Amino acid sequence: MISPAIERLLYLVAAVLFITGLKNLQSPATARRGNATSGIGMLLAIVVTLLELEILSPAVLIAGLLVGSAIGWWMARSIKMTSMPQMVALLNGFGGAASLLVGGAEFLKSELRGEAISVDTGITIQLTLLIGAVTLSGSLIAWAKLQEVMTGKPITFPAQKVFNALIFAAIVGLSAYQLYTPDSLLWPFYAVCGLSLLLGVLLTIPIGGADMPVVISLLNSYSGLAGSMTGFVIQNDVLIISGALVGSSGIILSQIMCKAMNRSLANVLFGSFGATVTATGKSAAGLTVKSISVEDAAIQLAYAQSVIVVPGYGMAVAQAQHTVRELAELIEKKGGTVKYAIHPVAGRMPGHMNVLLAEANIPYDKLFAMEDINSEFDNCDVAIVIGANDVVNPAARSDPASPIFGMPILDVDRGKSCIVLKRSMGAGFAGIENELFYAPKTSMLFGDAKASLGKLVSEIKQL
């Protein structure tokens, strides 16, 4: 048993570690340290809680920590970087499930013992059940979309928003019934859990693959809010603090990414973007693309003084980040400079491109956010686009009829020349033609990104 003073002191230390870790996550250069700092804080909070409440014996506690750490280590080592968004989605779901189980256990314990639940505690429990269940089922749908177990396109049906509103109203009504009636019936509890799980599914299926970064960030926020609600239920200060930090930071990140797409959060959640491809926007009829050979592309890159690499999801799919680094090192040996332009919503989760490039040991000071790099495209000799599409489409600036009009993009078309690595001329998630591909300064290098980059590396070595 830990004394109350020591317990609160250790909880305070854990909270400080959470805040410090979150601050370090602001920069790729300190993100790894921030992750480790937050992990230490969580470990401290878990150990203190279990020892203070005498839930487990020290031997069982150590065994649980070893087993959990082993599973986490195995997941981190075995999951491919291209599958990291799916893993993050699942971890968000686990957080929601934990809150749902704890909130449900507290409710059932009080009901089965015949103990009265205060109104404020009862409201908090109902919020824990709702947010935890929505996070769990919503995260599983996000995982299924990212894993391509189900279609990544929006799934809609008539009167979907009305149906969702009715389900939410039913959840609120059943929650109120449990709070204000003395009956010890358990069917409303199970109904709330079941309807909340269904609501999580229905809120996530109409969101398309292009909006997955926002969805993952939002679900992460939900898991934090659910954890914070759970902290109020079990009166655990450190859980309240950590949950609030995750919840607020997730909302802020979601808003930042929505701003990067020139869309509101409501439009992302309820707009079913990409459900249908309309005839709006300019047509590619009569336009032609200019292909380039590996040899000619290698010559351009080898003798370029300034090269800007624009990574996209295609780089992740091809697992080409290590070959990108090798190509950049060769260009730098030839006397050129290489920088990387990162769009906020490139990839399938927040920071997806940063994670992949960091894994390839590309220096952090070469990664530039959109607002910091756009002014440099005018003086760029070659911009090389690797699997990016909508985030470099000039239609966002020039075509008011385009679905992405007004979305901030990387100004790749303003460079002196552009080489696009792409498998085919297929449209991006917005389902529209990319004007960049038909521009006079653009050359297309078709094929798998990793294979094409490997050939470029071989050619440049011979120059």
Image (spheres, grey):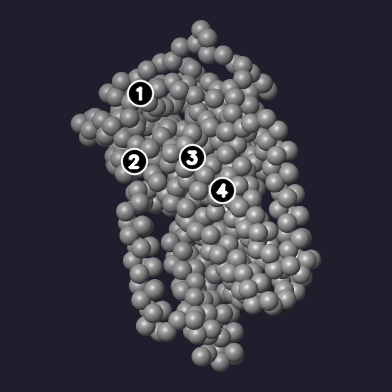
The residue pinned by badge 3 equals: 145
Crowding at mark 2 (Cα within 10 Å: few <14, some 14-19, many 20+): some
The residue pinned by badge 4 equals: 138
Can residue 194 be seen?
A: yes
Viewer-side residue, 262 vs 426: 426
Q: Do tag 3 and tag 4 residues touch (Cβ < 8 Å)?
A: no
Please say if 33 is above or below 360: below
Please say if 31 is above or below 429: below
Q: Which mark is residue 194?
A: none
Tell me the distance, in whole angstroms, between the alpha carbons under discs 3 and 4: 11 Å
Residue at disc 1, secondary structure: strand
Residue 267: quadrant of the picture? top right
191 left or right of 309 in image: right
Q: Do tag 4 and tag 2 residues touch (Cβ < 8 Å)?
A: no
Furthest residue toward right: 180
Q: From the viewer's perspective, is the residue at label 1 or at label 2 nearer?
A: 2
Can residue 253 be seen?
A: no
The residue pinned by badge 1 equals: 446
Please say if 324 is above or below 442: below
Residue at disc 3, secondary structure: helix
How far from the left and from the top, in percent, is residue 167? Answer: 70, 46
The residue pinned by badge 2 equals: 319
Residue at disc 2, secondary structure: loop
Crowding at mark 1 (Cα within 10 Å: few <14, some 14-19, many 20+): some
Tell me the distance, in whole angstroms, between the alpha carbons under discs 1 and 4: 36 Å
